[in-house]
Amino acid sequence: MKYYSTNNKNLIVNFETAVMHGLAEDGGLFMPAEFPKMEKDFIDSLEKFSFQEIAFRIAKKFIANEISDSNLQEIISNSITFPAPLVSIGKNLYVLELFHGPTLAFKDFGARFMAKTMGYFVAKRNINLNILVATSGDTGSAVAHGFYDTPGINVFILYPKGKVSLIQEKQLTTLDKNITALEINGTFDDCQRLVKTAFVDKELNKKLNLTSANSINIARLLPQAFYYFEAYKQIHNKKLHSIFSVPSGNLGNLTAGLIAKKIGLPISKFIGALNSNKVFAEYLQTGIFKPRPSIQTLSNAMDVGNPSNLIRIIEIYSNILKEMRNDIHTESYDDIQTRKGIKEVYENYKYIIDPHGSVGYLALRDYIKFDQQFNGVVLETAHPAKFKDVIEEELKIEVEIPERLAVCLNKEKRTVELSSQYDDLKEYLMKNR
Ligand SMILES: *Cc1c(COP(=O)(O)O)cnc(C)c1O
């Protein structure tokens, strides 16, 4: 399979290059040159396949012969290691729980698959790789856990000292082995600036094989298509139209759903559920993309003012706005509504939903008005325990912390503290690669 840059259709690379480079040389994002069709037989008989078998069949179409079947099987069995259960909470109303991974967020799917794929190419080429990631919280921990203990790959995570939650910090700083947490005396923007400076530093790059594990990496996007198939497999009444509501920020999750549809999964409609950061809704209405600074909300992983995957959605629809509008509906909700959504889901369905899922629920509710002629699926992107405070405030109950999170909360934090001066980071990396 070939991949092209969204900035230039003639810049074409293979899967390995797309994965190892992350971003195209011209700054574009990689997109598959074609959308393979999954066989009708396969889609009609999804129930017969395990989640890993589904993942393998889809991955195979996008990777073709660049990775052998047995190696791809190994990548899948090391990355799709937790389920994506579709929980029925009401008549034809479902929650797709994507939080069963090590860091309790759906990003574990993408991060793990990307890590194992990069690990495979690194071993094949017998090289060493150093990964630098700047994080404001969640992405960093999913990436760190994904790459944990991968031979040939070292990961340095830069995060702003004192500016991530206690849980997030514990998830970032309690891994050992090939993962190092760099606690930067500065802001998230400083962390991003440091990483960007490092990537263009010729002297550093000569010494160290540096790469990013960017959220826009194609190997993070593709595995997210797997769980849409896994979800559809679990729907009881497939005769009804199915509508999926996706709590969205950078639009990676939604893009993966649209790809699943494009390759044959019969999902009738997608809802891009947004918080007060609603650049995407404005784009669908007006056709004009106006990025803005992000606004802080309760569903903070969706606080994105310049969604990087929008360009991919535009590519999928060949820039035809009318077709985008046919497949995607958007709604936006503020924090007061998000809190009400958490309460409503608990009162009506006895289900504890996190703030991101709540936005997804509200958007679905308002779109289908619970018309039972549809299957409605809300993607629950994070475990409620990650937002314990808000939920306990709203529901007056105690939220249980899952074992895998409790374990890291009890571990000692280990970091290397650095200033926000680039020279300090460089000196450290030169010494410690
Ligand atoms: C990252 C994230 C989102 C947003 O997903 P995108 O792919 O960026 O649109 C939603 N919810 C949670 C919990 C996340 O971590």
Image (cartoon, helix red, strand yellow):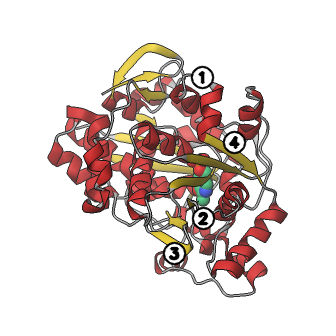
Count neighbours of disc 4 (C-alpha within 10 A) and say few if under 14, some if 14 to 19, many if 20 or more: many
Mark 3 or 1, closer to the camera: 1
Identify residue type, mark 3.
Leu
N-term-proximal mark, 4 vs 2: 4
**Marking on residue 190:** 4
N-term-proximal mark, 3 vs 2: 2
Residue at x 74%, y 82% (from the top left corner): 395
Whole-Å distance between the Cαs marked 3 and 1? 42 Å
Q: Which residue is mark 2?
A: 372
N-term-proximal mark, 3 vs 1: 1
Residue extending farthest bottom: 397
Residue 110 on image: x %, y %: 44, 50
N-term-proximal mark, 4 vs 1: 4
Whole-Å distance between the Cαs marked 4 and 2? 49 Å
Q: Which residue is mark 1?
A: 319
Residue 47, quarter of the rendered image = bottom left
Whole-Å distance between the Cαs marked 4 and 3? 28 Å
Residue 343 on image: x %, y %: 75, 76
Identify residue type, mark 1.
Asn
Identify residue type, mark 2.
Gln
Residue at x 49%, y 23% (from the top left corner): 202
Is residue 391 shown above or below 19? Answer: below
Q: Quadrant of the C terminus?
A: top left
Whole-Å distance between the Cαs marked 2 and 1? 33 Å
Residue at x 51%, y 79% (from the top left corner): 402
Count neighbours of disc 3 (C-alpha within 10 A) and say few if under 14, some if 14 to 19, many if 20 or more: some
